[in-house]
Image (cartoon, coloured by chain):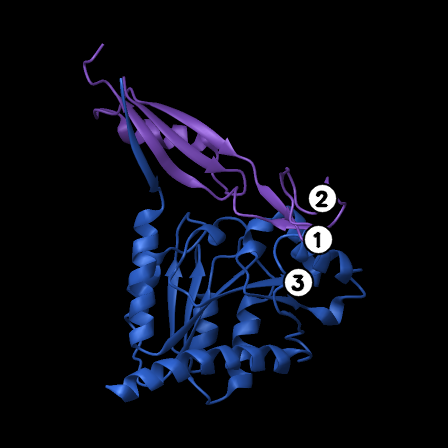
Chain colours: A blue, B purple
Protein backbone atom coordinates (compact mmCIF):
# COMPACT_ATOMS: atom_id res chain seq x y z
CA UNK A 1 0.00 0.00 0.00
CA UNK A 2 1.20 3.50 -0.81
CA UNK A 3 0.14 6.46 1.30
CA UNK A 4 -0.39 9.70 -0.66
CA UNK A 5 -0.62 12.95 1.24
CA UNK A 6 -3.58 15.06 0.08
CA UNK A 7 -4.33 17.66 2.81
CA UNK A 8 -7.10 19.34 0.86
CA UNK A 9 -10.12 21.06 2.28
CA UNK A 10 -13.31 19.23 1.30
CA UNK A 11 -15.17 22.53 0.95
CA UNK A 12 -12.40 23.90 -1.29
CA UNK A 13 -14.75 24.32 -4.26
CA UNK A 14 -16.99 26.57 -2.19
CA UNK A 15 -14.03 28.52 -0.85
CA UNK A 16 -12.79 29.14 -4.41
CA UNK A 17 -16.21 30.43 -5.48
CA UNK A 18 -16.39 32.61 -2.36
CA UNK A 19 -13.06 34.13 -3.35
CA UNK A 20 -14.41 34.84 -6.82
CA UNK A 21 -17.49 36.49 -5.28
CA UNK A 22 -15.26 38.60 -3.05
CA UNK A 23 -13.34 39.88 -6.08
CA UNK A 24 -16.60 40.64 -7.89
CA UNK A 25 -17.94 42.59 -4.89
CA UNK A 26 -14.69 44.50 -4.41
CA UNK A 27 -14.70 45.48 -8.08
CA UNK A 28 -18.25 46.81 -7.82
CA UNK A 29 -17.95 48.67 -4.49
CA UNK A 30 -20.27 46.31 -2.67
CA UNK A 31 -20.09 45.64 1.07
CA UNK A 32 -21.61 42.24 1.76
CA UNK A 33 -23.17 41.31 5.08
CA UNK A 34 -24.05 37.69 5.77
CA UNK A 35 -26.85 37.65 8.34
CA UNK A 36 -27.21 34.41 10.25
CA UNK A 37 -29.77 33.59 12.92
CA UNK A 38 -32.30 31.03 14.04
CA UNK A 39 -35.71 31.09 12.34
CA UNK A 40 -37.82 33.88 13.77
CA UNK A 41 -34.97 35.87 15.35
CA UNK A 42 -35.85 38.89 13.22
CA UNK A 43 -33.49 38.79 10.27
CA UNK A 44 -36.00 40.27 7.83
CA UNK A 45 -37.12 42.95 10.29
CA UNK A 46 -33.51 43.90 10.99
CA UNK A 47 -32.75 44.21 7.27
CA UNK A 48 -35.80 46.42 6.74
CA UNK A 49 -34.93 48.65 9.70
CA UNK A 50 -31.26 48.85 8.71
CA UNK A 51 -32.17 50.07 5.22
CA UNK A 52 -34.77 52.48 6.63
CA UNK A 53 -32.25 53.98 9.08
CA UNK A 54 -29.46 54.26 6.50
CA UNK A 55 -31.78 56.14 4.14
CA UNK A 56 -30.05 57.16 0.94
CA UNK A 57 -26.46 56.84 2.16
CA UNK A 58 -25.86 53.83 -0.10
CA UNK A 59 -27.64 51.76 -2.71
CA UNK A 60 -29.06 48.53 -1.29
CA UNK A 61 -29.58 44.99 -2.46
CA UNK A 62 -30.96 42.03 -0.56
CA UNK A 63 -30.61 38.29 -1.15
CA UNK A 64 -33.20 36.25 0.69
CA UNK A 65 -32.39 32.62 1.51
CA UNK A 66 -35.22 30.31 2.48
CA UNK A 67 -35.94 26.65 1.89
CA UNK A 68 -39.24 27.68 0.31
CA UNK A 69 -41.54 30.66 -0.40
CA UNK A 70 -41.08 34.26 -1.59
CA UNK A 71 -42.62 35.85 1.49
CA UNK A 72 -39.55 37.84 2.54
CA UNK A 73 -38.64 38.84 -1.03
CA UNK A 74 -42.16 40.14 -1.56
CA UNK A 75 -41.86 42.29 1.57
CA UNK A 76 -38.60 43.80 0.26
CA UNK A 77 -39.95 44.30 -3.26
CA UNK A 78 -43.06 46.05 -1.90
CA UNK A 79 -40.73 48.64 -0.36
CA UNK A 80 -38.84 49.09 -3.62
CA UNK A 81 -35.70 47.31 -2.40
CA UNK A 82 -33.85 45.33 -5.12
CA UNK A 83 -34.13 41.71 -4.02
CA UNK A 84 -33.33 38.20 -5.20
CA UNK A 85 -34.95 35.18 -3.55
CA UNK A 86 -33.02 31.93 -3.32
CA UNK A 87 -35.03 28.83 -2.48
CA UNK A 88 -32.66 26.14 -1.29
CA UNK A 89 -35.10 23.24 -1.39
CA UNK A 90 -33.85 20.87 1.27
CA UNK A 91 -30.58 22.66 1.89
CA UNK A 92 -30.23 24.35 5.24
CA UNK A 93 -27.75 27.07 4.21
CA UNK A 94 -26.66 29.30 1.34
CA UNK A 95 -23.39 28.59 -0.46
CA UNK A 96 -21.00 30.64 -2.59
CA UNK A 97 -22.34 29.30 -5.88
CA UNK A 98 -25.89 30.45 -5.08
CA UNK A 99 -24.67 33.90 -4.07
CA UNK A 100 -22.53 34.23 -7.21
CA UNK A 101 -25.54 33.53 -9.42
CA UNK A 102 -27.85 35.89 -7.54
CA UNK A 103 -25.33 38.73 -7.15
CA UNK A 104 -24.87 39.33 -10.88
CA UNK A 105 -28.58 40.07 -11.28
CA UNK A 106 -28.30 43.43 -9.48
CA UNK A 107 -27.10 46.66 -11.05
CA UNK A 108 -24.29 48.34 -9.14
CA UNK A 109 -23.97 51.96 -10.17
CA UNK A 110 -22.90 53.36 -6.80
CA UNK A 111 -21.54 51.96 -3.52
CA UNK A 112 -23.94 49.25 -2.46
CA UNK A 113 -24.71 47.48 0.79
CA UNK A 114 -25.74 43.91 -0.01
CA UNK A 115 -27.53 42.23 2.86
CA UNK A 116 -27.78 38.45 2.63
CA UNK A 117 -30.42 36.80 4.78
CA UNK A 118 -29.10 33.28 5.24
CA UNK A 119 -31.43 30.36 5.88
CA UNK A 120 -32.71 30.39 9.46
CA UNK A 121 -30.36 27.93 11.12
CA UNK A 122 -27.60 28.14 13.74
CA UNK A 123 -25.56 25.20 12.42
CA UNK A 124 -24.62 24.86 8.73
CA UNK A 125 -24.52 28.51 7.56
CA UNK A 126 -21.38 29.02 9.64
CA UNK A 127 -19.43 26.54 7.50
CA UNK A 128 -19.98 28.03 4.05
CA UNK A 129 -18.20 31.22 3.07
CA UNK A 130 -20.16 33.36 0.63
CA UNK A 131 -17.56 36.01 -0.15
CA UNK A 132 -18.94 38.29 2.55
CA UNK A 133 -17.18 41.15 4.30
CA UNK A 134 -19.04 40.76 7.57
CA UNK A 135 -20.81 37.97 9.38
CA UNK A 136 -23.57 39.09 11.70
CA UNK A 137 -25.37 36.82 14.13
CA UNK A 138 -28.75 37.94 15.41
CA UNK A 139 -29.92 36.39 18.64
CA UNK A 140 -33.36 37.17 20.02
CA UNK A 141 -34.59 37.27 23.56
CA UNK A 142 -37.38 34.85 22.65
CA UNK A 143 -34.98 32.06 21.75
CA UNK A 144 -33.20 32.16 25.11
CA UNK A 145 -29.81 33.12 26.46
CA UNK A 146 -28.13 29.73 26.17
CA UNK A 147 -27.56 29.61 22.40
CA UNK A 148 -23.85 30.62 22.36
CA UNK A 149 -23.15 27.57 24.54
CA UNK A 150 -25.21 25.25 22.32
CA UNK A 151 -24.15 26.62 18.92
CA UNK A 152 -20.65 28.02 19.45
CA UNK A 153 -19.54 27.66 15.81
CA UNK A 154 -21.87 30.31 14.48
CA UNK A 155 -20.75 32.79 17.15
CA UNK A 156 -17.14 31.98 16.32
CA UNK A 157 -17.68 33.60 12.92
CA UNK A 158 -19.58 36.65 14.19
CA UNK A 159 -17.99 40.04 13.46
CA UNK A 160 -20.85 41.56 15.44
CA UNK A 161 -23.73 40.18 17.47
CA UNK A 162 -27.19 41.68 17.72
CA UNK A 163 -29.71 40.83 20.41
CA UNK A 164 -33.12 41.57 18.95
CA UNK A 165 -36.52 41.85 20.68
CA UNK A 166 -35.04 43.59 23.70
CA UNK A 167 -38.53 45.00 24.35
CA UNK A 168 -39.38 41.47 25.50
CA UNK A 169 -36.20 40.92 27.54
CA UNK A 170 -37.88 41.09 30.94
CA UNK A 171 -40.90 39.03 29.92
CA UNK A 172 -38.62 36.36 28.44
CA UNK A 173 -36.38 36.42 31.53
CA UNK A 174 -33.46 36.71 29.13
CA UNK A 175 -30.22 36.53 31.13
CA UNK A 176 -28.06 39.08 29.35
CA UNK A 177 -24.97 38.27 31.40
CA UNK A 178 -25.18 34.55 30.70
CA UNK A 179 -25.58 35.25 26.98
CA UNK A 180 -22.61 37.63 26.87
CA UNK A 181 -20.46 35.25 28.93
CA UNK A 182 -21.29 32.57 26.36
CA UNK A 183 -20.21 34.71 23.40
CA UNK A 184 -17.05 35.75 25.27
CA UNK A 185 -16.25 32.07 25.89
CA UNK A 186 -16.16 31.49 22.14
CA UNK A 187 -13.98 34.41 21.02
CA UNK A 188 -12.87 37.88 22.14
CA UNK A 189 -16.16 39.75 22.59
CA UNK A 190 -17.25 41.19 19.21
CA UNK A 191 -19.27 44.43 19.04
CA UNK A 192 -22.68 43.77 20.60
CA UNK A 193 -25.84 45.72 19.80
CA UNK A 194 -29.06 45.35 21.74
CA UNK A 195 -31.90 46.27 19.43
CA UNK A 196 -35.64 46.16 19.13
CA UNK A 197 -36.99 46.31 15.59
CA UNK A 198 -40.38 46.88 17.19
CA UNK A 199 -39.67 50.04 19.20
CA UNK A 200 -36.45 51.11 17.46
CA UNK A 201 -34.18 51.05 20.48
CA UNK A 202 -30.49 50.45 19.74
CA UNK A 203 -30.92 50.59 15.97
CA UNK A 204 -29.05 53.90 15.57
CA UNK A 205 -25.95 52.47 17.27
CA UNK A 206 -26.04 49.34 15.10
CA UNK A 207 -26.55 51.29 11.89
CA UNK A 208 -23.75 53.75 12.70
CA UNK A 209 -21.35 50.87 13.30
CA UNK A 210 -22.37 49.26 10.02
CA UNK A 211 -22.05 52.57 8.21
CA UNK A 212 -18.51 52.87 9.58
CA UNK A 213 -17.71 49.49 8.03
CA UNK A 214 -19.15 50.69 4.70
CA UNK A 215 -17.10 53.90 4.78
CA UNK A 216 -13.96 51.90 5.43
CA UNK A 217 -14.53 49.65 2.43
CA UNK A 218 -15.96 52.23 0.05
CA UNK A 219 -13.40 54.83 1.06
CA UNK A 220 -10.59 52.47 0.22
CA UNK A 221 -12.23 51.16 -2.95
CA UNK A 222 -13.28 54.60 -4.15
CA UNK A 223 -9.78 55.89 -3.47
CA UNK A 224 -8.43 53.03 -5.54
CA UNK A 225 -10.73 53.78 -8.47
CA UNK A 226 -9.77 57.47 -8.30
CA UNK A 227 -6.14 56.46 -8.86
CA UNK A 228 -6.94 54.86 -12.20
CA UNK B 1 -8.18 -1.74 -1.37
CA UNK B 2 -8.25 2.04 -1.17
CA UNK B 3 -8.55 3.92 2.11
CA UNK B 4 -9.33 7.62 2.52
CA UNK B 5 -8.22 9.35 5.70
CA UNK B 6 -10.53 12.21 6.66
CA UNK B 7 -9.98 14.72 9.43
CA UNK B 8 -13.09 16.27 10.98
CA UNK B 9 -13.21 18.76 13.83
CA UNK B 10 -15.79 18.37 16.55
CA UNK B 11 -16.91 21.98 16.12
CA UNK B 12 -18.18 21.27 12.60
CA UNK B 13 -21.62 19.89 11.86
CA UNK B 14 -20.12 16.95 9.94
CA UNK B 15 -21.28 13.52 11.13
CA UNK B 16 -19.17 10.47 10.26
CA UNK B 17 -22.16 8.24 9.56
CA UNK B 18 -23.66 10.79 7.17
CA UNK B 19 -20.42 11.15 5.22
CA UNK B 20 -20.18 7.35 4.99
CA UNK B 21 -23.82 7.10 3.92
CA UNK B 22 -23.49 9.58 1.04
CA UNK B 23 -20.03 8.32 0.06
CA UNK B 24 -21.47 4.82 -0.36
CA UNK B 25 -24.29 6.12 -2.56
CA UNK B 26 -22.05 8.33 -4.70
CA UNK B 27 -19.33 5.75 -5.29
CA UNK B 28 -21.56 2.81 -6.16
CA UNK B 29 -20.41 1.36 -9.48
CA UNK B 30 -17.17 3.40 -9.49
CA UNK B 31 -13.56 2.48 -8.72
CA UNK B 32 -14.11 3.86 -5.22
CA UNK B 33 -16.99 1.51 -4.49
CA UNK B 34 -14.94 -0.57 -2.06
CA UNK B 35 -12.90 2.28 -0.62
CA UNK B 36 -12.84 2.56 3.14
CA UNK B 37 -13.34 5.88 4.88
CA UNK B 38 -11.27 6.34 8.02
CA UNK B 39 -12.31 9.21 10.27
CA UNK B 40 -9.99 11.09 12.59
CA UNK B 41 -11.93 13.42 14.90
CA UNK B 42 -10.24 16.50 16.34
CA UNK B 43 -11.39 17.81 19.71
CA UNK B 44 -11.66 21.59 20.06
CA UNK B 45 -8.80 23.38 21.72
CA UNK B 46 -9.25 26.26 24.12
CA UNK B 47 -6.82 28.95 25.15
CA UNK B 48 -6.87 30.62 28.56
CA UNK B 49 -7.39 34.38 28.28
CA UNK B 50 -5.32 34.90 31.46
CA UNK B 51 -2.27 32.65 31.20
CA UNK B 52 -2.39 31.47 27.58
CA UNK B 53 -2.46 27.78 28.48
CA UNK B 54 -3.93 25.66 25.64
CA UNK B 55 -6.07 22.66 26.49
CA UNK B 56 -8.72 20.43 24.91
CA UNK B 57 -12.29 20.18 26.10
CA UNK B 58 -15.76 19.27 24.98
CA UNK B 59 -17.75 22.47 25.48
CA UNK B 60 -17.21 26.20 25.76
CA UNK B 61 -17.13 28.04 29.05
CA UNK B 62 -14.68 25.67 30.75
CA UNK B 63 -12.11 27.25 33.02
CA UNK B 64 -8.38 26.89 32.56
CA UNK B 65 -7.12 23.78 34.40
CA UNK B 66 -3.92 25.70 35.13
CA UNK B 67 -5.05 29.01 36.62
CA UNK B 68 -8.86 28.88 36.59
CA UNK B 69 -9.09 31.72 34.06
CA UNK B 70 -11.72 32.07 31.36
CA UNK B 71 -11.06 30.51 27.98
CA UNK B 72 -11.94 31.05 24.32
CA UNK B 73 -11.82 28.68 21.37
CA UNK B 74 -8.36 28.27 19.84
CA UNK B 75 -7.74 27.00 16.32
CA UNK B 76 -8.50 23.31 16.45
CA UNK B 77 -11.92 21.69 16.04
CA UNK B 78 -13.00 23.19 12.71
CA UNK B 79 -11.16 20.81 10.37
CA UNK B 80 -12.81 19.10 7.41
CA UNK B 81 -10.22 17.83 4.99
CA UNK B 82 -8.77 14.78 3.25
CA UNK B 83 -5.48 14.07 4.96
CA UNK B 84 -4.28 11.25 2.71
CA UNK B 85 -5.30 8.27 0.64
CA UNK B 86 -3.85 4.79 0.76
CA UNK B 87 -3.80 2.92 -2.53
CA UNK B 88 -2.57 -0.46 -3.63
CA UNK B 89 0.69 0.12 -5.51
CA UNK B 90 1.27 -3.58 -6.18
CA UNK B 91 4.39 -3.54 -3.99
CA UNK B 92 3.16 -6.29 -1.71
Residue underneath mark 2: B64
* CB-based contact (under 8 Å), mark 2 and mark 1: yes
- Give how far across and how far down residue A150 sits, in percent: 64, 47
Q: Chain of mark 3?
A: A
Residue underneath mark 1: B50
Question: Disc 3 to disc 1, how far (Cα)?
Answer: 30 Å
Question: Disc 2 to disc 1, how far (Cα)?
Answer: 9 Å
Q: Residue at x 37, y 76 (%)?
A: A30
Does mark 1 fall on the same chain as mark 3?
Answer: no
Question: Disc 2 to disc 3, how far (Cα)?
Answer: 30 Å
- Left or right, B36 with reference to A57: left
- Give how far across and how far down residue A129 sits, in percent: 41, 56
Does mark 1 fall on the same chain as mark 2?
Answer: yes
- Give how far across and how far down residue A214 sits, in percent: 46, 79
Secondary structure type for disc 2: loop
Q: Chain of mark 1?
A: B
Secondary structure type for disc 1: loop
Residue underneath mark 3: A140
- Left or right, A76 with reference to B44: left
**On screen, B48 above or below A157?**
above
Q: Residue at x 61, y 65 (%)?
A: A190
**On screen, A228 above or below A12?**
below
Residue A38: in sight, yes or no?
no
- Left or right, A122 with reference to B62: left
**On screen, A51 above or below A99?**
below
Q: Chain of mark 2?
A: B
Image quarter where the N terminus of chain A lies is top left
Amino acid sequence: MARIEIRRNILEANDNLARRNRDFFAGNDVLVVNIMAAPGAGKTSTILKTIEYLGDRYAFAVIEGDMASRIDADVMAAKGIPVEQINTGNMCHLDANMIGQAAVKFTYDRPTLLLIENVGNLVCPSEFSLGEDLNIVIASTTEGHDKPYKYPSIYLRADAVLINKTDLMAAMEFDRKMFCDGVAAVKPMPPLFEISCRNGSGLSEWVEWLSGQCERKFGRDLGKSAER
Amino acid sequence: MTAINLVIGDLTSIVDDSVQFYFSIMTKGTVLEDAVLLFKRVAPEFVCTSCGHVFTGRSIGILCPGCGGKSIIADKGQEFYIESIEVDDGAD
